Image (spheres, grey):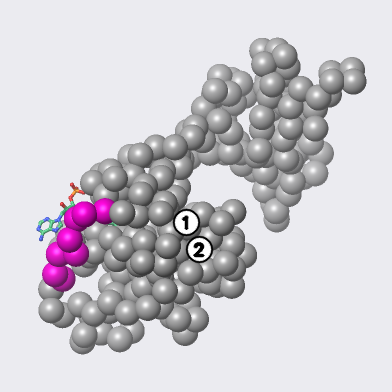
């Protein structure tokens, strides 16, 4: 919590993971005044250096962009939340006959990790430096670390002749009791045949059958998935968050 005398004026979270310090959850009340965001940023830099961290990563609402930009942060990506009704009239268009979609299982973790690494490679969402990181993330989602997984709404797509590489996948779990789609991905060689839309629609339809009327997801602005989500009725909900990084000179 941030206090001015006896009055709370904001909050934030500052913590460390490996050689990186992280700052997120920054919320400042209007009475905090214009200079507090800049003070928070410079204090975070000082503490990161004192902890011998090499990077300071942050997630903050776009309203604070001036303070972070002035302190030399480099923008990595902009994220926003989206929400849609699961009651959607679009039909499931048939897929090429060589593709088969089935419910995913824990046995698929390694292959989904490989798929996500390939699908996100070279883009702004390439979050993990290696395959182990992607597999750990998939395991965390399926183990319910982000909220209980909804297995009936989580699918993989396989090519009938290739059982070693997945063509696509989608995972859904509850986040504070609202279904969230986490990582829709299609392997580069299977794109633009409608598989991404098929997986997204199938998940939404199944959620509706299970009695969930809305679904949320988080997306990076500017990625191809954005068009797909708009087509399926998703609208932006909530502020845009910026994720920048600043190297620390220790
Ligand atoms: C986003 C993603 C899943 C889309 O997968 P996809 O299978 O290519 O999706 P679709 O085929 O349904 O749609 C992609 C485009 O192909 C077009 N398309 C679909 N079927 C087509 C066909 N038979 N012929 C020609 N074009 C076709 C769609 O109209 C769509 O066009 P758009 O550019 O207007 O959106 C894929 O690009 C991906 O994995 N990206 C990286 C991971 C990612 O960013 N995930 C989202 C996380 S929030």
Q: Which residue is drawn at 48% across and 58% down?
A: 179
Q: Residue at x 59, y 54 (%)?
A: 176
Q: Residues within 10 Å of mark 1 (few under 14, many from 20)?
A: many
163 sits to left or right of 56: left
Q: Residues within 10 Å of mark 2 (few under 14, many from 20)?
A: many
Residue 165 on image: x %, y % = 32, 79
52 sits to left or right of 207: right
Label 1, secondary structure: give it. Answer: strand
Quadrant of the rendering where the N terminus is positioned: top right
Residue 13 on image: x %, y % = 73, 40
Which residue ends up furthest to the right in the rendered image?
A: 6
Check if mark 1's residue and mark 2's residue have beta carbons within 8 Å: yes
Q: Does the residue labelled 1 lie within 8 Å of ligand 1?
A: no
Residue 15 on image: x %, y % = 74, 46
Residue 116 visible in this rendered orientation of the protein:
no
Quadrant of the rendering where the C terminus is positioned: top right
Range drawn in magenta: 88-95
Residue 155 visible in this rendered orientation of the protein:
yes
Q: Which residue is drawn at 36% across and 61% down?
A: 208
* Residue position marked by numbered label 1 in the rendering: 180
Which of the 4 image quadrants contains residue 66? top right
159 sits to left or right of 17: left
* Residue position marked by numbered label 2 in the rendering: 173
Which of the 4 image quadrants contains residue 89? bottom left
């Amino acid at each position: 919590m941030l206090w001015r005398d006896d009055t709370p004026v904001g909050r934030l979270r500052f913590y460390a993971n490996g050689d990186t310090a992280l700052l997120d959850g920054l919320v400042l009340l209007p009475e905090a005044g214009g200079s507090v965001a800049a003070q928070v940023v410079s204090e975070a830099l000082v503490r990161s250096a004192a902890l011998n961290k090499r990077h300071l990563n942050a997630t903050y609402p776009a309203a604070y962009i001036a303070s972070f930009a002035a302190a030399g942060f480099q923008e990595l990506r902009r994220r926003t939340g989206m929400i849609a009704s699961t009651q959607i009239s679009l039909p499931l268009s048939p897929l090429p006959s060589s593709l088969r979609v089935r419910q995913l299982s824990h046995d698929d973790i390694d292959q989904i990790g490989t798929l996500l690494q390939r699908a996100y490679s070279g883009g702004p969402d390439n979050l993990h430096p290696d395959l182990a990181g992607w597999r750990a993330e998939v395991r965390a989602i399926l183990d319910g670390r982000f909220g209980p997984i909804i297995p009936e709404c989580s699918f993989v797509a396989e090519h009938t002749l290739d059982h070693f590489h997945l063509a696509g996948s989608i995972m859904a779990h509850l986040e504070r009791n609202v279904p969230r789609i986490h990582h829709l991905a299609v392997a580069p060689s299977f794109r633009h045949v409608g598989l991404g839309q098929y997986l997204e629609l199938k998940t939404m339809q199944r959620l509706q059958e299970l009695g969930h009327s809305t679904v949320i997801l988080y997306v990076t602005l500017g990625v191809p998935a954005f068009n797909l989500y708009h087509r399926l009725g998703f609208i932006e909900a909530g502020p845009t968050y910026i994720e920048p990084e600043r190297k620390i000179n220790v």
